[in-house]
Image (cartoon, rainbow, N blue to C red):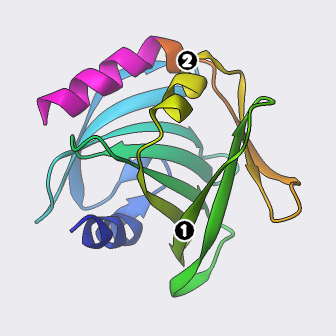
Amino acid sequence: MKTLAMTAIATLMTTSAFAESQDWLLSENADWKVFLVDLENEPLSCVMENAEPEVGISFMVWTYGDGFYDIQLYDDTFDFEPGTSGHLVLQIDDKQPVVGAAVAIDESIFMNGLDDFEFLVDCTFGNTLYVLDDNGNETHWFSLDGTAALMVEFMNCAQSL
């Protein structure tokens, strides 16, 4: 079901907005926002997002309240065929990178089923999130400013699902 949800999200998602869905902004701080999202025919979800619409990119952490987290990297310059697979490499500051299987659809890359709670803790106390290529080179980066203040809101949202 989560794969279907992520496919629906990819189809409906635009940078910093959830087209054809209902979303409620729960909180925002610095570069991050927390939303409750209701996609048609899908379970409610909570999203923590850092969007930079002026450059067409965003980084989102999704949860459906099941203890797992899905990562979405959106870049309006991406143009993937549906079902393209590979992996996503994320690094916070100088911590060990997190590598996970990923599926790419249109302008988004999804890493589903992340259960690494330490990654969320590192997001909370880190400074910068890097997306790396296969050679370890930075392709995207996002400030983590604001995540510490929003993590409690994100977790409360997840527990309410």
Residue 137 against residue 95 in the figure, above or below: below
The residue tagged 1 is 102
The residue tagged 2 is 146
> Disc 1 to disc 2, how far (Cα)?
26 Å
Would you say 23 lies left or right of 88 here?
left
Would you say 53 lies left or right of 29 here?
right
Which amino acid, mark 1? Ala
Find residue 100 and report its horizontal and vertical position in percent. 57, 59
Judged from the image, the secondary structure of the residue bearing numbered disc 2 is loop
* Residue at 31% across, 70% down: 3
* Residue at 57% across, 79% down: 85
Along the line of sight, which residue is nearer the eye, 94 or 104?
Answer: 94
Would you say 127 lies left or right of 23 here?
right
Residue 54 against residue 150 in the figure, above or below: below
Find residue 76 and report its horizontal and vertical position in percent. 62, 65
Q: Main secondary structure of the magenta part?
A: helix
| Residues drawn in magenta | 149-161
Judged from the image, the secondary structure of the residue bearing numbered disc 1 is strand
Q: Which numbered disc, 1 or 2, marks the residue that appears first in the sequence?
A: 1
* Residue at 55% across, 17% down: 146
Q: Are marks 1 and 2 in contact (CB under 8 Å)?
A: no
